């Protein structure tokens, strides 16, 4: 009896609590920045969260900021990537946010929707200084939240020795790409090009193909998904053709496996970001540097690649927002970013930084710099993680022959529409 | 209600000393009670309440500014093919995994209890080691075993069988993970069964031997009935553990290929990751109900008959 009364009481209390609330429509309104930032030196404490390698080495760079702004002190908190998303969400829920946080480019839409991020002050930076695709990752509904800090883009890694033996050169078009991958396979590779048949984040391989074909993820006005278009069909069919022709083995290679298979020649080419250059040079031995090269991705109407990276955002609850934005502005200056590349090997998000000899004279980095001028990020909508998981799943059905391209795209369109753009 | 009041009325009025004792008792219990209410009961009630709302990431700063949606989340769950598929996977995992684990653990325990005398400790440690090993280390080792040119396929090749790519094959991925989970869980049950076997009266065995019962007859008529409570306990804890099937697909397959290893817990985890907090809460309460149901069935089936 007693237990039931308690249960009843709890239920009643919960019901009361819940009926007392309700969504108030449009109360939040559009976010607005709290004003422009002056050029005086920064003062006070600034706390910043950064993930992975950035979290470990950012302090080295921050000391330089402290030297230039003697009254300011920067506290860097390193957060592991795996728990970063949840930790930021928790800090927003608890109202205990840092002043600044690094954000994965695909998180901006989601966190901006909570109202926890402050829009970038109008005159803080010039958007045209940044790569167009990267700046787009910070913009939600025409409002910029923070700035792109470093960028990441995918290029084609290929075995030059195998390509030379087969008499082919780095492809520039889709047709050449098919021939190229076949030629590498004929040279003894199990996969002429290694592509994941599906699974986590495989959308990052197929979305660029749709962009290259002239398509996009959202309609012009950003309200509807456009997966049921001919461009996406072309992209899916092209992707599928590599598995149908047996040019790509339907095996998903994780980090650690792919380098080994590339070095031993069973993978002829693959798509990846800048970090693989260092890994391959380190693991391949002294003479491997002559056996591989990077090239811009092949294309159709464009040679667009995928871009990701890290952004910096300032929280609305920041107690020292002026200094926080000053630090963000400093971090996004080309000179700082060149310095930062030396510390972290993160690629600068500003175009001007690439005029520096560090980048323009490097055979690998110059390719990344070129690719960055034609690279794109997924739309900054809060539901993107969920929508992209649907693409991953349907793409796998296609590559494994479980469903047709048309059915898969119809299904993606339907599921994505029911998930919505979250706006 | 009447029963309660009459019983309370009949109770002698508490003396001053007794009341003081009650207060002291509550004082001792308070540290736990406070922690339990704040960190356990609170979130549990909150998540139940959450499952009837439309809370998502956008409400992080104003969690009470949400709409009540009643059973909508539950209705949507049962219209979601992926969730239904995950329930099916979890069901297969439990129905195959739990009996196999129990039978194997019992066999190992019997062998250690009677047959094996030399190196008994070595075997016990060997079977228990997987339980205490980090899942991350286990995942790496099992990937080496299960990869296309891995140990398992190398072993099968000796017999001229060319094995599949276990983790990338929609037919074999789930059985592979079941195998791995069974291997991980045998240790715990083995220890429980070993303890249970100590409690089987020797006299019963001796009496049965005098009556001419052989080893197998004695196992089914003496050992097993005596172990009934132990088996029930083992079935319940393994059932609960297996229904919450998460770590194996998380580290090995992320639910793939083609959702072949997507469990309900994994599905719930993904939904939390997407920021659909209320929907994910609803999914976890469905899983909770399944656990209650399975435990009830097990109690019913394995209850002592006397």
Image (tube, coloured by chain):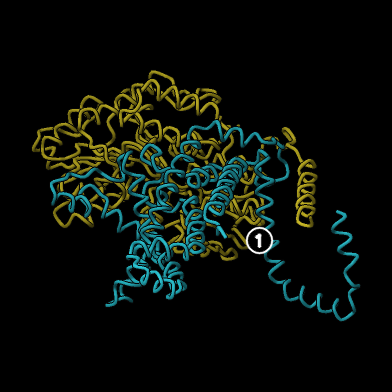
Chain colours: A yellow, B cyan
Closer to the camera in the image, B135 or B230:
B230
Q: Residue furthest bottom?
A: B17
Residue position for label 1:
B39
Query: Mark 1, residues whose alpha carbon is within 10 Å: few (<14), some, or many (≥20)?
Result: few
Q: Which chain does the residue under circle 1 lie in? A: B
Where residue A404 appears, x then y in whole percent? 35, 22
Q: Which of the 4 image quadrants contains residue A174? A: top left
Quarter occupied by the N terminus of chain A: bottom right
Could you tell me which residue is drawn at 38 percent across and 41 percent down? Answer: B256
Quarter occupied by the C terminus of chain A: top right
Q: Say if B272 sits above or below A74 in the image.
A: above
Q: Which of the 4 image quadrants contains residue A247? A: top left
Closer to the camera in the image, A307 or A235:
A235
Could you tell me which residue is drawn at 33 percent across and 72 percent down? Answer: B114
Q: Secondary structure at mark 1?
A: helix
Q: Is residue B225 visible?
A: yes
Q: Say if A3 sits above or below A124 in the image.
A: below
Where residue A315 appears, x then y in whole percent? 62, 50
Q: Say if A95 sits above or below A360 in the image.
A: below
Could you tell me which residue is drawn at 80 percent across and 45 percent down? Answer: A16
* Numbered label tally: 1
Q: Residue furthest left?
A: A165
Where residue B244 appears, x then y in whole percent? 50, 51
Q: A132 left or right of A369?
A: right
Q: Is residue A35 visible?
A: no
Closer to the camera in the image, B281 or A349:
B281
Q: Residue furthest front?
A: B211
Where residue A414 appears, x then y in whole percent? 50, 24
């Amino acid at each position: 009896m007693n237990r039931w009364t308690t249960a009843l009481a709890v239920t009643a209390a919960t019901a009361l609590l819940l009926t007392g609330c309700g969504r108030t429509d449009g109360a939040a309104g559009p976010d607005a920045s709290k004003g422009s930032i002056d050029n005086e030196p920064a003062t006070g404490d600034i706390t910043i969260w950064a993930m992975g390698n950035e979290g470990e080495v950012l302090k080295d760079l921050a000391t330089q900021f402290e030297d230039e702004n003697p009254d300011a002190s920067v506290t860097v908190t390193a957060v592991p990537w795996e728990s970063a998303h949840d930790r930021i969400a928790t800090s927003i829920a608890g109202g205990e946010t840092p002043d600044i946080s690094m954000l994965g480019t695909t998180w901006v839409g989601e966190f901006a929707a909570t109202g926890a991020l402050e829009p970038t002050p109008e005159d803080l930076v010039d958007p045209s200084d940044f790569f167009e695709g990267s700046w787009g990752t910070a913009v939600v509904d025409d409002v910029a939240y923070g700035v792109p800090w470093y960028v990441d883009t995918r290029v084609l890694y290929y075995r030059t020795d195998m390509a030379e033996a087969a008499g082919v050169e780095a492809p520039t078009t889709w047709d050449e790409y098919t021939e190229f991958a076949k030629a590498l396979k004929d040279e003894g590779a199990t996969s002429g090009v290694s592509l994941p048949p599906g699974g986590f984040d495989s959308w990052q391989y197929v979305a660029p193909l749709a962009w290259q074909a002239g398509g996009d993820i959202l309609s012009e006005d950003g309200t509807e998904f456009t997966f049921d278009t001919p461009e996406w069909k072309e992209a899916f069919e092209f992707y599928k053709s590599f598995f149908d022709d047996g040019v790509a083995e339907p095996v998903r290679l994780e980090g650690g496996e792919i380098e080994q298979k590339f070095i031993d020649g069973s993978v002829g080419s693959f798509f990846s970001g800048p970090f693989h250059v260092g890994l391959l040079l380190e693991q391949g031995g002294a003479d491997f540097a002559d056996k591989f090269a990077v090239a811009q991705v092949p294309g159709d109407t464009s040679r667009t690649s995928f871009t990701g990276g890290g952004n910096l955002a300032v929280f609305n609850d920041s107690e020292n927002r002026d200094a926080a934005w000053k630090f963000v502005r400093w971090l996004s200056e080309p000179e700082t970013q060149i310095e930062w590349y030396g510390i972290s090997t993160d690629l600068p998000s500003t175009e001007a930084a690439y005029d520096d000899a560090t980048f323009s004279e490097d055979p690998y980095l110059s390719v990344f710099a070129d690719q960055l001028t034609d690279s794109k990020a997924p739309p900054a909508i809060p539901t993107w993680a969920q929508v992209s998981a649907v693409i991953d799943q349907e793409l796998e059905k296609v590559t494994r022959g479980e469903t047709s391209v048309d059915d898969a795209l119809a299904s993606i369109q339907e599921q994505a529409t029911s998930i919505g753009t979250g706006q | 209600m009447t029963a309660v009041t009459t019983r309370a009325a009949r109770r002698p009025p508490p003396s001053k000393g007794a009341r003081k004792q009650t207060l002291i008792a509550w004082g001792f219990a308070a540290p736990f009670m406070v922690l339990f209410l704040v960190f356990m009961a609170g979130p549990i009630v909150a998540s139940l309440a959450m499952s009837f709302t439309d809370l998502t990431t956008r409400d992080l700063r104003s969690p009470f500014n949400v709409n009540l949606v009643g059973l909508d989340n539950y209705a949507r769950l049962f219209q979601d093919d992926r969730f239904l598929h995950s329930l099916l996977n979890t069901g297969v995992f439990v129905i195959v995994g739990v009996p196999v684990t129990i039978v194997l653990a019992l066999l190992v325990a019997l062998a250690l209890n009677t047959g094996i005398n030399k190196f008994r400790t070595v075997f016990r440690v060997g079977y228990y080691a997987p339980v205490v090993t980090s899942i991350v280390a286990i995942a790496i080792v099992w990937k080496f075993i299960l990869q296309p040119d891995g140990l398992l396929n190398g072993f099968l090749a000796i017999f001229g069988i060319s094995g599949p790519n276990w983790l990338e094959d929609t037919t074999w991925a789930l059985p592979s993970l079941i195998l791995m989970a069974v291997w991980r869980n045998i240790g715990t049950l083995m220890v429980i069964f070993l303890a249970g076997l100590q409690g089987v009266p020797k006299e019963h065995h001796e009496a049965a031997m005098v009556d001419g019962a052989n080893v197998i007859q004695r196992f089914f008529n003496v050992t097993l009935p005596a172990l009934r409570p132990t088996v029930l306990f083992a079935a319940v804890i393994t059932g609960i553990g297996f229904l919450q099937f998460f770590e194996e697909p998380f580290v090995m397959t992320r639910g793939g290929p083609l959702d072949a290893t997507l469990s309900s817990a994994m599905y719930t985890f993904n939904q939390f990751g997407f920021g659909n907090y209320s929907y994910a809460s609803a999914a976890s309460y469905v899983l909770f109900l399944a656990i209650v149901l399975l435990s009830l069935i097990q109690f019913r089936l394995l209850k002592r008959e006397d």
